[in-house]
Structures are given as C-alpha cells and as structure tokens.
Amino acid sequence: MRSSSKYEEQLSTFSKNSRVVLVTGGAGFIGSHTVLVLLEQGYQVVVLDNLSNGSYEALTRVEKLVGKRLSFVKGDVRDQSLVTSIINKYKISDVLHFAGLKAVAESTLNPLQYYSVNIEGSLALLQAMVENSVKRFIFSSSATVYGENAKIPYREDSSRGTPSSPYGKSKAAVEQILEDLAQADDSWQICCLRYFNPIGAHNSGLIGEDPEGVPNNLLPYISHVAAGRYSKLNIFGGDYKTPDGTCRRDYVHVMDLAEGHVAALQNLVAGFDVINLGTGVPVSVREMVAAYEAVCGKEIAFEIAPQRAGDLPEFWSDCAKAKQKLSWEAVRSLKEMVEDTWQWQTKNPLGYHNEE
Ligand code: NAD
Ligand code: UFG
C-alpha cells in the first residue's frame, strides 16, 4: 500500500473470484480491525477514508499483520463522483460504511457538521451505489438509536426512540433512510449493526484506538491515567440508581465486533434488518476501573464528578438475534478487553504518532 498523486490510491492485484468490499472509514478504530478480519477471511478490501480521525499507519500495520495487501483511497465519503469511480474501478460488490463523526458532546456543539458527514455522507454513498447497482450494505449504527426510554436490555424489536444528541439522531435518521430504501427496492440487502460500547485492541498490540486530543470515552481515558499522562479519572456521576451508583454499559471487544461484521456480510439477505452487537453483560464504571487496575497492576486514581449531560444510567444488549441470525456472539472476556487495551497503550504510548 502506497500513496499516488491524486487520491493516494493504489490498486492491488485482485483475485478475480473474490468479493471486493468497500470499507468507508476503514482507517479508524473499528474499521481497521474489521479490515484485518476481512483480509484474513479472503475478501479484497478497498478503504475510503479522509483520515480526519483515522490513521494510514493503522492500515500499514494491518497489511503487515495479515501479510496481504489492500487498496486505499484518501477522500471524503460525501464526494459522490469519487465513490462512483471507486465502485467502478475496483468492481465493488459490498459496502461496509463506518465513515462518520462520533463524538456525542461535539455533535451538540456542531450539529451541522455531524448531519453533513453522517447523513449527507451516507446519502452520497448510497446514491453512488444505486448508480452502479451495488446493493449490499452494512451500516455502523449505535445503541443510542434506542433513545432514552427503551426497555433494558435493548431488543431490536423495540422501535427506534429519540436519541438526545445530534450524533444519535444522525444514526437514527440513516437507519430510517435505509429502511425506506429497502422498502422501495426489494433487491437491496441492508443490515444496521447497533454497537454497544466497543473497546479493546487486536491482541498483537499493533492496532487499537487512537483518539485525537483528550479522550471522551472511558477506556482511552483510563489508559491515559494508567500511563501517567493524566493524574486522575473523573467518574461522571456516583449517585445513579445502579448497584454501585456509577453508570453501567455493555462493553464489547473490537475484535468481536470486527468478526460480527464479517458474519453479517456472510449472512446478508434481501431487505432491511437491525442487529445488536454487544455482550449482554453490564459493567459499571467502578467495575471497569477495578478490572483495569488488576490488569495494569497500578492504582487508577479517580474522583466522583458531576453527571455528564446526556448519559443514561445504564443499558445493555439483548444479543439473542445476532446469535440466531449471524451465528455470532461475543467471545472475549472483560479481562481480555482490558489486557488488549493496556497492551496497545504500553506498546504505543502516543498511538500511531510514534511512527508518523
Ligand atoms: P473512528 O473515528 O475511529 O473511525 C471513523 C473513520 O471515518 C475515521 O478513520 C475517519 O477518518 C473517517 N471519516 C470521518 N469522516 C469522514 C468522511 N467525511 N469521509 C471519509 N472518511 C471519514 O470511529 P470508530 O469508533 O471506528 O467508529 C466507526 C463507526 O462506528 C462510526 O460511524 C461511529 O459513529 C460508529 N459507532 C462507534 C461507536 C464507538 O463507541 N466507537 C459506537 C457506536 C457506533
Ligand atoms: N465516563 C466517565 N469518565 C470519563 C469517560 C466516561 O465516568 O472520562 C463514563 C460515562 O459517564 C459513561 C461510561 O463511562 O457512564 C461510558 O462512557 P463512554 O463515553 O465511553 O461511552 P458512552 O456510553 O457515553 O457512549 C457510547 C459510544 C457512543 C454511543 C453511546 C450510546 O461512544 O458512540 O455509547 O450507544 F452513542
């Protein structure tokens, strides 16, 4: 994989018989791990990413780990003519759409940017697919689409709620667009995967989560405390009506998620579907801190801070549908999630910037 002048792209030699998957946002956290599993499973992969929050280095490492090549195009998913040219050039058969913005708080400050990237980006991609009669699509959705009042554990047969943030609303809107599209044209095969809380890293320690700036999410923040970059963790709220007063979430290993995408691709059928990807097991913030301390052998200093606006006290998945429809279930334990996160942190204290 090297960069060329126009789009920093390079065509790998594709085997004629295998499927060619376009992975938008493939240089990001979940996308890069999924690209790795796709390559391992024999798919040909083309990544489209504008590198606004992803890393070219992640893809270089994926290639080294798997011993296979992929193709990379640097560009914006909202550029419909670029997407059309990629679909034609690489003879794309399937699309996994990860590209998007994901910081919940930032989305409340800059909703137009979030609606533009997450909704316009999806529309441009889908329009390019229609032009080229490519109709197999997997979308990165989120547990946030269940909204604030859904019954716990979240089940796919409960209707979409109203998420509190523009980020969540953008995910719910794209799900609705996809549902309408499948309703209008029954040759589409569409699956929305609703992720719970992805954490962890590949067990080589070579690829992982590399957020820009101060992390918003719990695990990257704890990692920075453990590594000594921050003095303490602020636990947002200690007075929730949960067993220990802190929020509970369904944390799922990013490699389980990656394998879930390949299972979804292999089981994609006509119509529109939504499937939860989680473990079904709630873990509190305090439990996560204790798990991290056990793995890294250090104390994680913390302080109970005020609740964070928009946080729900607790939610987790009912994961029966994924098992039934995809023969997939999360298999990696909380200990493995934390061990792999810590290994990634210790091997890459500055994330991918070590070598960039
Ligand atoms: P990430 O930020 O690591 O990856 C997203 C990738 O998309 C990045 O590489 C970024 O450079 C790229 N990108 C952003 N805007 C783009 C654009 N306009 N054109 C092309 N590429 C663009 O995030 P992630 O954690 O890997 O999440 C992947 C997807 O899963 C996102 O859609 C996110 O909303 C969704 N999701 C994430 C979580 C989570 O907690 N990580 C939870 C639920 C859903
Ligand atoms: N938390 C802290 N301190 C921190 C960071 C987080 O106490 O410094 C707590 C939060 O209050 C929450 C828990 O840790 O209780 C998890 O927070 P994250 O920010 O890691 O994850 P969220 O559950 O808020 O958000 C995730 C995804 C979003 C998605 C949302 C709902 O990151 O994409 O779940 O599905 F929208």
Image (tube, rainbow, N blue to C red):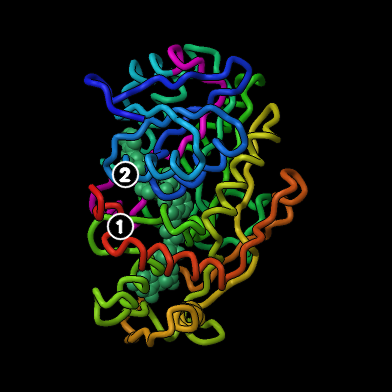
Three-letter code, disc 2: Ser
Question: In the rendered view, does 62 fall on the left or right side of 108?
Answer: right
Rendering coords of residue 225 (x, y %): 31, 77
**Mark 1 to mark 2 CA distance (whole Å):** 10 Å
Q: Quadrant of ligand 2?
A: bottom left
Three-letter code, disc 1: Gly
* SS of the residue under disc 1: helix
Q: Is mark 2 within 8 Å of ligand 1?
A: yes
Tally of numbered tags? 2
Q: Residue shown at 65%/50% (left/top)? A: 156
Taking 288 as reference, is 148 above or below it?
above
Q: Quadrant of residue 306?
A: bottom left
Instruction: Report the front residue among 115 and 78.
Output: 78
Q: Residue shown at 68%/50% (left/top)? A: 157
* Residue 93 belongs to the span the image colors magenta: yes
Rendering coords of residue 129 (x, y %): 49, 19
Q: Are marks 1 and 2 in contact (CB under 8 Å)?
A: yes
* Residue 212 belongs to the span the image colors magenta: no
Rendering coords of residue 278 (x, y %): 60, 58
What are the residue bounds of the magenta stretch?
Answer: 87-111
Residue 55 — which label? Answer: 2
Q: Is residue 23 visible?
A: yes
Rendering coords of residue 124 (x, y %): 39, 24
Residue 280 — which label? Answer: none
Residue 351 — which label? Answer: 1
Instruction: Report the front residue among 27 and 69.
Output: 69
Q: Residue shown at 54%/59% (left/top)? A: 253
Mark 1 crowdedness (10 Å alpha carbons): few <14, some 14-19, many ≥20: many
Taking 217 as reference, is 259 above or below it?
above
Q: Quadrant of residue 56?
A: top left
